[in-house]
Image (cartoon, rainbow, N blue to C red):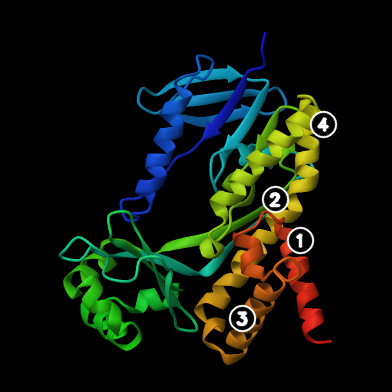
Amino acid sequence: MSPFLLCILVFRTSSVIPPVLFLVSYFFVVFSESEQYENVERYFNHKLIESNLKKGSLTFLKTDTNETVNVTADLIIGADGAFSAVRKAMMKQPFFDFSQKYIEHGYLELCIPPADNGGFLMPANYLHIWPRGEFMMIALPNQDCSWTVTLFMPFTKFKNLDTEEKLLAFFEKYFPDSIPLIGKKKLVEDFFAVSPSPLVAVKCRPYHVEDKALIIGDAAHAVVPFYGQGMNAGFEDCTLLDQLFQKHNDNLAEILKEFSETRWEDTFAISDLAMYNYIEMRDLVTRPSYKLRKAMDDFIFWLLPNFWVPLYNSVTFSTMPYSRCIKNREWQDRVRFL
């Protein structure tokens, strides 16, 4: 009998975040592709309520009928998000290290609509940033020529903007050029339609239980979004897992053990990098010292691309492990001060 693999996925969408349309489309492309394989079964509306990871047994509640379903698997992979039920079960195991950090800043989504002619209201091939020291606003283009605008700010400041007058005065002071793009009426409607959402980062290890269970993606290493690497880090988990299956000839005990031993350093690194990048995006980018360093990095990179790779390039545009990206930056700092 061939091994039975159970992969637990949680897919959440938000009516406030337009870019999720792309994720939904990609999800259903992959999902439709899986229908070609007779050995892949798909279940919806199943909530994990109990588990024995060492035995590979799980109990689900069917949320549409309130029935319970018991299953067993040779390998359980939990890809069920930052508040993973599989990770929660792992936390009962001895020597499982876990930390969770909420930052004092939240985020709220706004939207710049398409222009009257159906095009973009701003140059489209860029991430637009309004850095304001303690807080910032960014805008990302969407396929329908609208923009997702995200305001990152301390919760205390969000709380103070409790009237239409205060909100408009705040935007007139800090983001005046965005008001005609968003529209005053839409700005007020969207801002007060939802509450700001929190941002959480998760670090834990090990990622497995014997040869029976593994967590990947946000379930293993949720990060704040300021490097845009959360999904990519999850894809890297899959790449490493595939390499280990080939290396160890499907020996699950060795595969999962090595995954935990080798992956944590890079996931901890991208978590730290993402936290740092928020400070850089909202504050450091406005400083002359930052601009000088960036100009120097870009010039040396242009001159010696195989010798000097700036931090952002190494994280975003290369397959260099995240932990090595940090070490590379530390080496560059030492060279700069020689």
Q: Residue at x 34, y 57 (%)?
A: 142
Query: Which residue in the protein does label 3 denote?
Result: 294
For marks 1 and 3 on the same chain, the one whose residue lies earlier in the sequence: 3
Which quadrant holds the C terminus?
bottom right
Query: Which residue in the protein does label 1 denote?
Result: 324
Q: CA distance from mark 2 to mark 1?
A: 20 Å
Query: Which residue in the protein does label 2 denote?
Result: 204
Residue 289 is situated, as x and y percent measured from the top left of the image, at 62, 89
Q: CA distance from mark 1 to mark 3?
A: 20 Å
Mark 1 or mark 3: which is in front? Answer: 3
Three-letter amino acid code of the residue under disc 1: Arg
Can residue 252 be seen here? The reply is yes
Mark 2 or mark 3: which is in front? Answer: 3
Drawn side of residue 273 relative to residue 259, left or right: left
Residue 43 is situated, as x and y percent measured from the top left of the image, at 45, 24
Q: CA distance from mark 4 to mark 3?
A: 43 Å
Q: Secondary structure at mark 4?
A: helix
Circles 1, 3 touching at the beta carbon (< 8 Å): no
Question: Label 2 crowding class (10 Å Cα cut-off): few <14, some 14-19, many 20+?
Answer: many
